[in-house]
Amino acid sequence: MKKRYGCLIILLVAVVAACIAGLSVTGGFRFSTITNFGAAQYVQNIMHFHKPRYYRALQDIEARKSIGRIAADEECLFTLKARRIFICEGYVKRNEVTWIAITVFRGMDAVHAYIMVPESEAVLFGEKVNSAYIERLPADYLRSFDAIYRKEYEDALMAKVRVIVPADNLGRQKARENRALAVVPDLRGTVSFYEKKDAALVKRIHGFYLGERYTQVRLTQIDDGFTLEPGF
């Protein structure tokens, strides 16, 4: 009997560990979800093992502050225009429709809202399939933006900072041992260095072009008149 209970305990621990690992990988423990969308959405995301992903609207969709009755005369926060990109932060199925928690940016400010699509198909790990209203952005599409941002980052870095490119392994080793130098982060090609006195500037340039928030601001911008200025 004791052996049987021991096996059950081990199995339970394994299941719990697997769930925690899954939630950690998918982002299920994002406590910002509670602040932005409420505790109910947070619980839904844990149940779905939801991970935030980029989607695109296929037609104009009204965005609301919260989930409500379709017939209710709730004020529209904004209209998510066709072809606009948004971050899918979770979803809630309500019989014949699906409410999707989204994040977009108006200028530098994040806007959190819900859009409703009149479809009830299952949503698995944040992927809505066969939808006439939204589509998940393919990986190669996102990679194309990443390539653009990396090129802009490298150009800005070369223009603003003295970048040292040693000619060979010996030169690179000497640079690594030089306490006044540091390795340039995320620079393609050979290992390069910059002077540590420029560390704050390098960090700002890196954050502007490759930081997650700035990527979100650029991809999900709903203000057509907004221009993202580097400021360095």
Image (cartoon, rainbow, N blue to C red):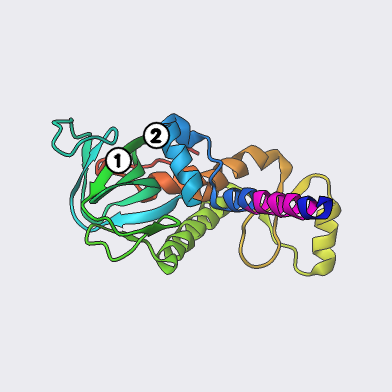
Is 139 one of the magenta-colored residues?
A: no
Residue positioned 34% across, 35% down in the render: 111
Is 16 one of the magenta-colored residues?
A: yes
Tell me if 225 is positioned left or right of 47 in this view.
Answer: left
Report x, y in % for residue 80. 23, 46
Residues 124 and 213: in front is 124
Q: Secondary structure at mark 2?
A: helix
Report x, y in % for residue 163. 66, 54
Residues 21 and 212: in front is 21
Report x, y in % for residue 94. 28, 45
Report x, y in % for residue 32. 49, 34
Disc 1: which residue: 114
Q: Which residues are magenta?
A: 6-18
In the image, residue 22 sits, relative to residue 199, either above or below, namely below
Disc 2: which residue: 37
* Type of the residue with mark 2: Phe
Residues 174 and 79: in front is 79
